[in-house]
Structures are given as structure tokens and as C-alpha cells.
Image (cartoon, grey):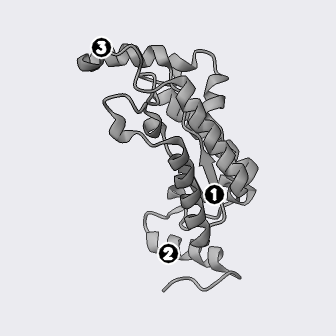
Amino acid sequence: MTPRYLPGRSTIGEAHRGARQHVPLEEYKKNLERMVNRVKAAGCGNTLLITPPPVCNESRMKFLHKNCPSSANNSAADRSLEVSGQYADACVTVSKELGVPSLNLWSSFQTQPAWNAELLQDGLHFSPSGSGFLFSRLIAAIDQEFPCMRVGALQLDFPLHGDINPNSPQESIDDHLGRYYTGRREAPE
């Protein structure tokens, strides 16, 4: 499974002081295409594209004015909801063109009440709640798009901590590996 996520860093406005981070929209799309095609060529067919999150303009401006005094003269934030939405749309378009699923984080964030205050810490970067939200959406997308990769469907390479006999850990591991590899392939030496 290869989740591909190019965060909001690419969506910076060209006119701002951080323009060195700016990636033009068409180049962003081509980069996504190249990454997906390279991963597919390497034999990994399970790819999930994740859109950039939304940007909260007001929170971003407050953060910049407080923490980046040189940006206080700018009338617009370095990133915006509108521009991040264009990159999110491009990501979804590329996923459809290449036949891979996508997780539209830009849209799903905005379905949450107070998303701008709860899920983002400075209008751009995830808060702890935002990271948790991404995790829950990622797990849901894996469950839907790649059912064979659900957490419950995967076999453990090693026993759970509680299943290891503290007096004979190697025996516990060997026993687990014997069950795991039975009928599938030989256990490693």
C-alpha cells in the first residue's frame, strides 16, 4: 500500500516570499502522475492519493502576523482556501485519470464543525485532532478501497507482546512463525 500525500506546501502562492516552495498546478499534476506510475511500475498496485487539506485564510493570516512580522504588510496569506482547493481538485482528477482511489481531505475536513480551529493549528498545519482525523479517514479509505489490507485482515509477522512467554521468548516467536508460515512458505532460518 502506497499512500501518496503532497501536503499544502505545494499550494503556496507564487507571489509570496515562500515562492521557492510554489509548485505550479500543472507541474503538481505531472508530479502526482509520475509518482503513481513509478510505484505501479515497481509492482505496487495499491496506491491511494490524498489531497492537500484546506487552508483557513483567517487563521493563517493571524499566525503570519504574529510569527512572521515581515509578512504583516501582505494583505493575503501565503496560502488560501481557494488555491488549496484547486490543488485538491487536481489530485482527485489525476486519481480518476490513473484509476487509483483518492481521499479528499480538503472536502472531508470542511464537513467538520469548527474545522479551522479544531483540525488546523495555524490555518495550515494539522493540530493533534487534525492528525487523528486524517488517520481515521485513511483507515476508512483503506477498509473501503483495499479490504485485503484492513488491519484485521493482515497477519502478524511476530506474536503480540502479551503472547510472548517471558521465560522463553524465542520459543514463543518460533511457535508463532510456525503457525504463520504453515502452508504458505518456509519460515526464515
Q: What element carries label 1?
A: strand
Q: Which residue is drawn at 57% across and 49% down?
A: 29
Q: What residue type is labelled 3?
A: Ala
Q: Do labels 2 and 1 touch, CB within 8 Å? A: no
Q: Which of 108 and 132 is in front in this view?
A: 108
Q: Residue at x 60, y 32 (%)?
A: 106
Where's residue 92, x and y in %? 67, 43
Q: Which of marks 2 and 1 is nearer the N terminus?
A: 1
**41 vs 55: above or below:** below
Where's residue 91, x and y in %? 61, 44
Name the mark nearer the viewer: 3 or 1: 3
Estimate the spatial distance between the alpha carbons at disc 2 and disc 3, rounded to whole Å: 64 Å
Q: How crowded is mark 1: few (under 14 residues within 10 Å), some or many (20 or more)?
A: many
Q: Residues within 10 Å of mark 2 (few under 14, many from 20)?
A: few
Q: Which amino acid does label 2 sit on?
A: Glu
Q: Can residue 142 be seen in this view?
A: no
Q: Which amino acid does label 1 sit on?
A: Thr
| Quadrant in the rendering for residue 137 | top right
**164 vs 83: above or below:** below
- Residue carrying label 2: 171
| 89 with respect to 22 (left or right) | right
- Residue carrying label 3: 72
Where's residue 70, x and y in %? 24, 19
The image's mark for residue 151 is: none
Estimate the spatial distance between the alpha carbons at disc 3 and disc 1, rounded to whole Å: 41 Å
Estimate the spatial distance between the alpha carbons at disc 2 and disc 1, rounded to whole Å: 37 Å
Q: Which of 161 and 52 is in front in this view?
A: 52
| Quadrant in the rendering for residue 66 | top left
Q: Which of marks 3 and 1 is nearer the N terminus?
A: 1
Q: Do labels 2 and 3 touch, CB within 8 Å? A: no
- Residue carrying label 1: 47
Q: Earlier in the sequence, mark 2 or mark 3?
A: 3
